[in-house]
Amino acid sequence: MAYFKNKRIWITGASSGIGEALAVAFAASGAHLILSARNEQELNRVAAACGQAGALSVLVEPMDLGAHDSLPVIVDKVLKKVGKVDILINNGGISQRALAADTALDVDKKLMNINYFGTVALTKALLPSMITHQLGHIVTITSLTGKFGSPYRSSYAASKHALHGFFDSLRAELVQTPIKVTLVCPGYVRTNVSIHALTGDGSQLGTMDEATDRGMEPAEVARKVLRAIEQGKEEIWFGGKEVLGVYLKRFFPTYFSKVIGRTKVR
Ligand SMILES: NC(=O)c1ccc[n+]([C@@H]2O[C@H](COP(=O)([O-])OP(=O)(O)OC[C@H]3O[C@@H](n4cnc5c(N)ncnc54)[C@H](OP(=O)(O)O)[C@@H]3O)[C@@H](O)[C@H]2O)c1
């Protein structure tokens, strides 16, 4: 897409899944990329694929979204190298596969620290530069569980709901600037998200959910996200029949509670 040519695009969670698919899609559109996640080796693999796909440049910048104090330092470093960032894609995150009653409070805090506070900390570190340059688009990948709760996802859903509260408010604060805010709410996407998800004691689940395995392909998600950014959408939802949950929750909340409680979500 010509819209992304020459744009400087920073993607978190770029080492796998949706972030990797986004990186390759932006690369094919002739963007400059900054790729972040914890696993530098995987980032380098994705960077090589982006180079082949047509990226004008690729900067690998490892980051741990849970290490909040390090994020402003990383932002300074990136801005010194690239000058300004046109699009920030807040995609990095971690899921949960445990009942609330079985989840240690430290695990609840870890999910919030990475998914919510890490995303907020990175955004707040980059925002002054966007305001100075009077440009920017902040895109955050939340989830349909940012729109409704689901069994086995209590703190994951809480972190994604919290992102909606933060970014809806930020959008309102930026309404008189050219800076745009987009929230992306995917349903099931076939990535390693369940393999990486935390169980109640904080260990990784290590297995692929049936529901996730039947999900959308990450490349299809990337196409939808690029279109939403170009069209300046405030929020998009997509997925399989789980999208119906958004409407049921809104118009028939009591019925929805019964349905989601009986649905196989893993
Ligand atoms: N797959 C789905 O069904 C689905 C549905 C709705 C929303 N989402 C959301 O989509 C986003 C991407 O997930 P995915 O499905 O692509 O899963 P994934 O393959 O597990 O990718 C998650 C990405 O987040 C990064 N990450 C995890 N913890 C991090 C940390 N502490 N600091 C920095 N980066 C971290 C991972 O990289 P490192 O391990 O290298 O750090 C990885 O690149 C997540 O926010 C997820 O909640 C996924």
Image: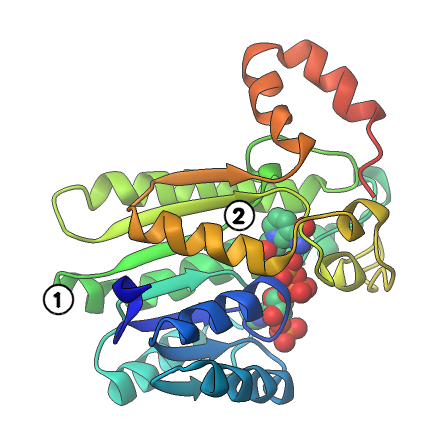
Between the residue at mark 1 and the residue at mark 2, the CA separation in whole angstroms equals: 27 Å
Quadrant of the image occupied by residue 106:
bottom right
Q: Residue at x 40, y 79 (%)?
A: 34
Task: Check disc 2: other Cα within 10 Å, few if <14, some if 14-19, many if 20+.
Answer: many
In the rendered structure, the answer to whether residue 63 lies left or right of residue 123 reads: right
Q: Which residue is drawn at 45% across and 74% down?
A: 69
Q: Does the residue labelled 2 lie within 8 Å of ligand 1?
A: yes
Residue linked to disc 2:
142
Quadrant occupied by the N terminus: bottom left
Residue linked to disc 1:
132
In the rendered structure, the answer to whether residue 186 lies left or right of residue 99 reads: left
Residue 9: x and y in percent read 35, 71
- Callout 2: helix, strand or loop? loop
- Callout 1: helix, strand or loop? helix
* Closest to the observer, 154 or 138: 138
Q: What residue type is labelled 2?
A: Thr
Q: Which amino acid does label 1 sit on?
A: Thr
Q: Is residue 72 above or below residue 146?
A: below
Quadrant occupied by the C terminus: top right
* Closest to the observer, 91 or 152: 91
Question: Which numbered disc, 1 or 2, marks the residue that appears first in the sequence?
Answer: 1
User: Which one is in front in this view, the residue at disc 1 or the one at disc 2?
Assistant: 2
